[in-house]
């Protein structure tokens, strides 16, 4: 039986009514990617306020790798509800914060003593990582990347690359932020080809120290191991080892922003593990909390201890419900083999997407790591002109037919998969059927041309 069940057109009457109230009461700057209001959710399925059932390939933008209402998360949160809700860790601490820090200090790659600070959001974690790096190195500058995304608060936004809609109108930005090209092989900034390029884009950092900023002034390089909002761009294997080595040579800290790549999405707890790099500081958030707000900054103990007492923290950082939820998320990954599942889902997607790519010029690139997978849509294979309008139409087609799917990328021409890893094979295939039909409707050929994975 199909999971998708549509009782009304999407959006239904109740969702449309709520959208009208929303327009009158909530600023338009808070975008809504789908006009569907949620009534309840479970696993990888969302039921809307009109009684329609949709498959969720968005996971609240990568926050639900362990699934909607993961049973262990629900039980842990319920138990905590009966104990206490808030005391502020800075005032009267509690054990779950310590337990979570201990778990993260072990899970984050790097065979050295580590410490973890807990905060509320990805952007807040990025801000703290940079504060700590500056405090430790006593240097002001930060290097970030074209097409990178690090959040919407002012320092995080200064590190974020995409102008529209994120940066335009919010100037001036924080000083001492310098941006360099990323390893976006499909659209190489240097018009080179891998592997003959010899990873020029990573080596180029040395040039930046001659042309743009003195290496001795740079506190940190902050980078996403796979670009999230930048279009799931996945660098070649050697890229991060070269970057990390250049950083080490100059006493610059290597900060991995694993807010979107983290927590099992890529088939390892952290994407850095694929690349064999041990960041000095790693930032995680999103799926760490299983749907509750929490973020972590984990790093070398001596670096994390740079700031004096009171220099770090916040009222709600590492709140008890979120800590319990995060511990339950880790247990769920371990008990239910969700890392293995992430890799299986990734393979399932790639098989299907490559068959689309073989037949449809619209699919320019298929890329990703584990279950963090995407397709980049282009008007022509030769020009690689971004098919932004077509991508928007595919996303609309998808929700109208019962699949919540998100676009991404600087050019808005990438469709990404962030389905909860607990999605069943049948649900996943059903979602891909809708996506395939959406692609067919904007420039492919007839639908159902391609067979499902066995
Ligand atoms: C890589 C990365 N860093 C930081 C952030 C900001 O996280 P938040 O929205 O929780 O502030 C995001 C959000 O999408 C992200 O993908």
Image (cartoon, rainbow, N blue to C red):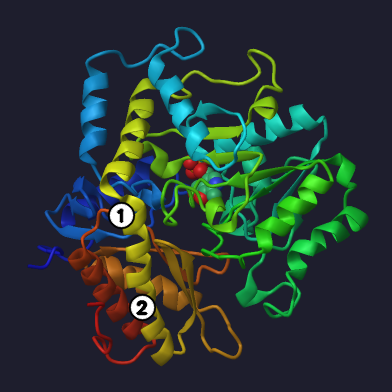
Establish whether ligand 1 lies closer than 8 Å to the Cβ of label 2: no
Compared across the picture, whether 306 is left or right of 360 comes to right
State whether residue 321 appears in this view: yes
Q: Which percent across, then down, holds residue 426?
A: 18, 67
For marks 2 and 1 on the same chain, the one whose residue lies earlier in the sequence:
2
Question: Going 75% across and 27% down the picture, which residue do you hit?
Answer: 135
- The relative height of residue 351 versus residue 260 in the rendered view (above or below) is below
Residue at image position (75%, 66%) is 201
Across and down, in percent, residue 137 comes to 79, 32
Count the marks: how many?
Answer: 2
SS assignment at label 1: loop
Q: Which residue lies under the disc numbered 1?
A: 421
Q: Image height check: is 130 above or below 209?
A: above
Q: Which residue is mark 2?
A: 351
At 43% from the left and 66% from the top, the residue drawn is: 373
Front-most of 19 and 5? Answer: 5
Measuring from the top left, give residue 198's x and y in whole percent: 75, 73
Residue that protrudes farthest toward the left in the picture: 1
Whether residue 215 sits left or right of residue 399 in the image: it is right
Q: Which mark is residue 131?
A: none
31 relative position to 245: left or right: left
The front one of 113 and 353 is 113
For residue 283, what is the image quadrant? top right
For mark 1, does the 10 Å Cα neighbourhood hold few (<14), some (14 to 19), or many (20 or more) residues?
many
Secondary structure found at label 2 = helix
In this view, the residue farthest toward the right is 210
């Amino acid at each position: 039986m199909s999971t998708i069940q549509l009782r009304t057109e999407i959006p239904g009457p109740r969702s449309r009514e709520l959208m009208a109230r929303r327009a009158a009461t909530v600023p338009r700057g808070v975008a809504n990617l789908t006009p569907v209001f949620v009534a309840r959710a479970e696993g990888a399925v969302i039921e809307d306020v009109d009684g329609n059932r949709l498959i969720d390939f968005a996971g609240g933008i990568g926050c639900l790798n362990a699934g909607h209402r993961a049973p262990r998360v629900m039980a842990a949160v319920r138990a905590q509800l009966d104990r206490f809700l808030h005391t502020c860790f800075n005032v009267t601490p509690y054990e779950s914060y310590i337990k979570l820090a201990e778990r993260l200090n072990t899970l984050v790659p790097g065979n050295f003593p580590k410490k973890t600070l807990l905060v509320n959001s990805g952007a807040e974690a990025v801000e703290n990582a940079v504060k700590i790096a500056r405090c430790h190195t006593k240097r002001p500058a930060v290097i970030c990347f074209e097409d990178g995304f690090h959040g919407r608060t002012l320092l995080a936004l200064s590190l974020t690359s995409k102008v529209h809609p994120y940066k335009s109108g919010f100037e001036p930005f924080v000083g001492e932020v310098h941006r360099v090209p990323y390893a976006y092989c499909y659209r190489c900034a240097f018009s080179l080809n891998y592997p003959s390029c010899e990873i020029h884009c990573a080596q180029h950092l040395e040039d930046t120290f001659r042309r743009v900023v003195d290496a001795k002034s740079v506190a940190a390089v902050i980078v996403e191991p796979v670009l999230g909002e930048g279009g799931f761009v996945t660098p070649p294997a050697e890229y991060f080892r070269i970057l990390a080595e250049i950083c080490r040579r100059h006493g610059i800290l290597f900060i991995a922003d694993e807010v979107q790549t983290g927590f099992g999405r890529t088939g390892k707890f952290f994407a850095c593990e694929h690349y064999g790099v041990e960041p000095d500081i790693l930032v995680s958030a999103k799926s760490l909390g299983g749907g509750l707000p929490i973020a972590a900054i984990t790093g070398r103990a001596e670096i994390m201890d740079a700031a004096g007492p009171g220099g770090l923290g916040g009222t709600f950082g590492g709140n008890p419900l979120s800590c319990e939820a995060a511990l339950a998320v880790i247990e769920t990954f371990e008990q239910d083999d969700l890392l293995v599942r992430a890799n299986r889902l990734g393979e399932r997607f790639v098989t299907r997407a490559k068959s689309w790519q073989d037949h449809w010029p619209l699919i320019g690139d298929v890329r990703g790591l584990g279950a963090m997978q995407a397709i980049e849509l282009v008007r022509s294979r030769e020009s690689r002109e971004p098919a932004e309008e077509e991508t928007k139409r595919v996303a609309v087609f998808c929700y109208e037919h019962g699949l919540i799917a998100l676009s991404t990328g600087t050019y808005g021409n990438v469709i990404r998969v962030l389905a909860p890893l607990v999605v069943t094979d049948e649900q996943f295939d059903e979602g891909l059927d809708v996506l395939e039909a959406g692609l067919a409707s904007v420039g492919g050929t007839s639908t159902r041309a391609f067979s499902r994975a066995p």
